[in-house]
Amino acid sequence: MRFAGRVSRGRIAEGSKSEREAVLIDLPQGRFILRRRDGNAFSDPELDRLVGSEVEGEGNVAGQTLIATEITAKKPG
């Protein structure tokens, strides 16, 4: 699926053993954990650089995670 949204960082799974900070993306369908297909699930410097940016790309949703196969920052203007 094609997607476009804003990347942020936030706490997920609060109160559980899986609680952690994660890179998130806000889409019209809701907020999802953002991962790159070949990226590390817990720490991905490529996604860290996108925090605060508007992005677009392609990927698949699996539960509460959007697994991006392609992702680029939108150019301002």
Image (cartoon, grey):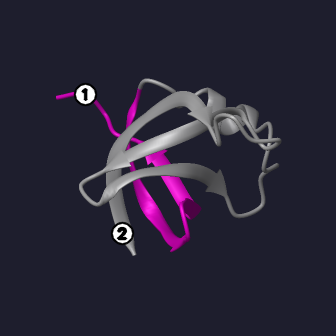
* Label tally: 2
Q: For numbered disc 2, what is the local secondary structure?
A: strand
Q: Which residues are magenta?
A: 53-77
Q: Which residue is mark 1?
A: 76
Q: Is residue 55 magenta?
A: yes
- Residue 55 image point, x, y percent: 39, 43
Residue 2's disc is 2
Q: Residue at x 77, y 52 (%)?
A: 39
What kind of secondary structure does the magenta stretch mostly adopt?
Answer: strand
Measured in 3D between alpha carbons, the distance from the residue under mark 1 to the one under mark 2, in whole angstroms, is: 19 Å
Describe residue 27's horizontal placement relative to residue 1 as left or right.
Answer: left
The mark lying in front, picked from 1 and 2, is 2
- Label 2 is placed on what type of residue? Arg
Q: Position of residue 75 (x, y in %)?
A: 31, 34
Image quadrant of residue 73? top left
Q: Position of residue 18 (x, y in %)?
A: 78, 44
